[in-house]
Image (spheres, rainbow, N blue to C red):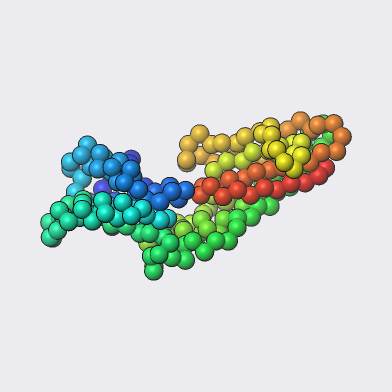
Amino acid sequence: MDFELPPFFDGKLGKKLVKIVPFEHPLSPLDLEELKRELEARPELENTVVFVCLGIELAARTWIEDWNRLRKGAETVNKIEVIELRTDEKYGNFIKHEPAAAKVAIARAGDSITVTIENFISPTILKRLDMDTPLFKAKIADWRSQIDCVMVDTAYDGAVFNVVLADVPAKKTDLIDGAYTLPAPEGKTTVAVKIVDMLGEEVLVTEGI
């Protein structure tokens, strides 16, 4: 029987609850203490918990060993498992990095500049979605779902990025617009478009107009 996913968790693997650790840091005891507080607040949850992470601190390994040592047998509740993407044999190909790429059309029309993102692809995200598991099995119907935010600088000097426009969806389920019209500075200029994907990777596209 299916069950409702508590907000703290990011997905399910069968009856197991999945928590994805932000990839900018390894799994740490702080992450585990957050889980402990969540489970204490929800005593009805008896599921095994799976952490998905890039790296794991030694102290976190010890924490998990101590936690699981008290949870043995067929009737065990809240056991903790880890999928460490740097070393896991099944999911290790996830971190073979290929840079993201974007196709962006930038044009001047009188006193305005138009910026249109025509396509975006993040091989890393696509590999994540192509994992052979119900948690990650998905299809990208709209390439915009890979993008976290877009920023535009209409007078980029090659060193400092001054944000003239920022498209940051309010909710995770919202998408960027992808098409923008901005005032054009006088004379020739370089327009820079910075696209940040859902895993934090940045793509910078520039064009002189």
Relative to 180, is 88 above or below? below
> What residue do we see at 77% from left, 46% from top?
207
The location of residue 159, given as percent across then percent down, is 72, 41
| Observer able to see residue 134 | no
Q: How many marks?
A: 0
> What residue do we see at 63% from left, 49% from top?
203
Pick whichever, 200 or 59, lies toward us.
59
Which residue reaches farthest front? 58
Quarter containing the C terminus? top right
The location of residue 182, given as percent across then percent down, is 73, 33
Which residue reaches farthest bottom? 89
> What residue do we see at 12% from left, 60% from top?
73
Query: From the viewer's perspective, is 11 left or right of 162?
Result: left
Relative to 174, is 24 above or below? below
Pick whichever, 112 or 195, lies toward us.
195
> What residue do we see at 28% from left, 42% from top?
33
Q: For residue 4, what is the image quadrant?
A: top left
Q: For residue 90, what is the image quadrant?
A: bottom left
The location of residue 40, given as percent across then percent down, is 20, 39
| Observer able to see residue 188 | yes
Query: From the viewer's perspective, is 182 left or right of 88?
Result: right
The location of residue 177, given as percent across then percent down, is 61, 39
Query: From the viewer's perspective, is 154 left or right of 202?
Result: right
Pick whichever, 124 or 86, lies toward us.
86
Query: From the viewer's perspective, is 91 left or right of 110?
Result: left
Which residue reaches farthest right? 187
Pick whichever, 118 or 167, lies toward us.
167
